[in-house]
Image (cartoon, helix red, strand yellow):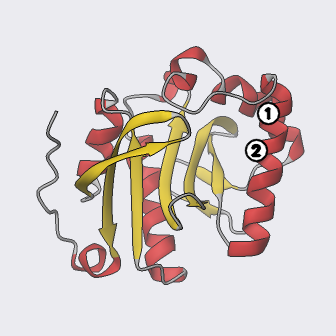
Amino acid sequence: MIALRTERLTLRPLVETDAEAYAAMRYHPEVAKWLSPADDEPLRAARASIGRFAASWQERRYAPWGVFRQGTLIGHGGLNFVPEFGETEVLWALHPDAWGHGYATEVARVALAYGFDDLGLERIFAITLPDNTASQAVMKRLGLTYRRRVTYKGFTDIVWFDTNREIWKAGAMPNSSVAS
């Protein structure tokens, strides 16, 4: 399992002792409205997610990290393999107190670099609800390009952005506008 640091954040795999803080962040109403609903009560669902992330670290050498600012869990972010699409997504979710500080972009940029440079992935995507303009703004800042709409986990209208290793390495910022 890989832990990384940015100038402001520590990214490390979540562990069992993070479960309460993770549940408080992940199932906060302002965060949960953008994500798939819990299959269980929040603490059990958080523990199950932490277990799935640990298994992915073992199997694929990547999963979402816990995002920590000065030792406090403020979110999760990183790479996640999505079997329904057979591809890897870059994702982030932050507690509302951490919104608007550039942390999502910071985490996602590190995750993309890890995916392309260290893991050799060819393409990475990001998805969100059409109304989540804040996440779409992060996607555009990262240089991801809007491609299509998809159905995922009960959501019938999800916007899909992606980029590939060649574009990422070139540092290109393609046109990434979304049609409403």
> Dot 2: what SS?
helix
Give the quarter of the image for residue 26. top right
Residue 162 tag number: none
Q: Is residue 157 above or below residue 119?
A: above
Q: CA distance from mark 1 to mark 2?
A: 6 Å
Res. 154 visible in picture: yes
Q: Quadrant of the C terminus?
A: top left
Classify residue 80 as left or right of residue 46.
left
The N terminus sits in image quarter: bottom right
- Answer with left or right where residue 34 lies relative to residue 82: left
Question: Is any part of residue 7 visible from this angle?
Answer: no
Q: Residue at x 29, y 73 (%)?
A: 168
Residue 49 is labelled as 2
Query: Which amino acid lies under the numbered mark 2 shown in the image of this protein?
Result: Ser
Label 1 crowd (10 A; few <14 / some 14-19 / many >=20): some
Task: Report the residue at 40% width, 59% height from top.
Answer: 125
Quick one: SS at disc 1? helix
Tell which of 130 and 18 is nearer to you. 130
Vertical arrangement, residue 122 with respect to residue 87, above or below: below
For residue 112, above or below residue 155: below
Left or right placement of residue 48 versus residue 107 in this view? right
Q: Which residue is mark 1?
A: 45
Is mark 1 in CB contact (under 8 Å) with mark 2?
Answer: yes
Residue 89, horizontal then vertical, whole percent: 48, 58
Residue 97 lies, in percent from the top left, at 51, 22
